[in-house]
Amino acid sequence: MLARERPDIHRTSFDRQFYREVAAFADRFNESARAGESGTVERFLDSERVTFVVEPPGGPPAVVSFRTTDDGRIVDLRAGARPDATVRFRTDARTAHRLFA
């Protein structure tokens, strides 16, 4: 299981909820990676540093970042952007919920 950050590092309730959704997704994703089932995503995102920005309706964006390993796992999940990101995603809240729920 991924380490969880203290909630007070997040600015809004949307930030906290989004972080929890991504953390739960990462746990499920890593289980698939261990079972050798991550497939396409592993091929595209192995050994990357990722920043993911979500634009909620009417508020500041929520930002999380993580690294992916060469075997396709998500590690080092944290709130905020990575200054050394090699991949940056930006999407709206509705799409993010569909991706990570």
Image (cartoon, grey):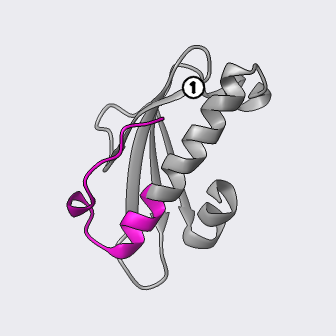
45 lies left or right of 58: right
Q: Amino acid at mark 1?
A: Arg
- Residue 89 visible, this orientation: no
**Residue position marked by numbered label 1 in the rendering:** 73
Answer whether residue 12 is magenta in the image: yes
Q: Badge 1 local density, few (<14 within 10 Å), some, or many (20+)?
A: many
Does 4 sit above or below residue 85?
below
The residue depicted at 47 percent of the width and 62 percent of the height is 18
Farthest residue, direction left: 8
The residue depicted at 40 percent of the width and 43 percent of the height is 65
Q: Nearer the viewer, residue 63 or 34?
A: 34
Tell me where residue 67 appears, x and y as whole percent.
Answer: 45, 29
Q: For the magenta stretch, what is the residue range?
A: 1-19
Q: Quadrant of the C terminus?
A: bottom right
21 lies left or right of 83: right
46 lies left or right of 36: left
> Residue 39's image quarter?
top right
Farthest residue, direction top: 70
The residue depicted at 27 percent of the width and 60 percent of the height is 7
> Residue 19's image quarter?
bottom left
- Residue 9 visible, this orientation: yes
Does 40 sit above or below residue 63?
above
Question: For the image shown, how many numbered marks are present on the structure?
Answer: 1
Tell me where residue 93 appears, x and y as whole percent.
Answer: 56, 70
Answer whether residue 67 is magenta in the image: no
Tell me where residue 80 appears, x and y as whole percent.
Answer: 31, 50
Tell me where residue 32 appears, x and y as whole percent.
Answer: 71, 30
The residue depicted at 62 percent of the width and 22 percent of the height is 72
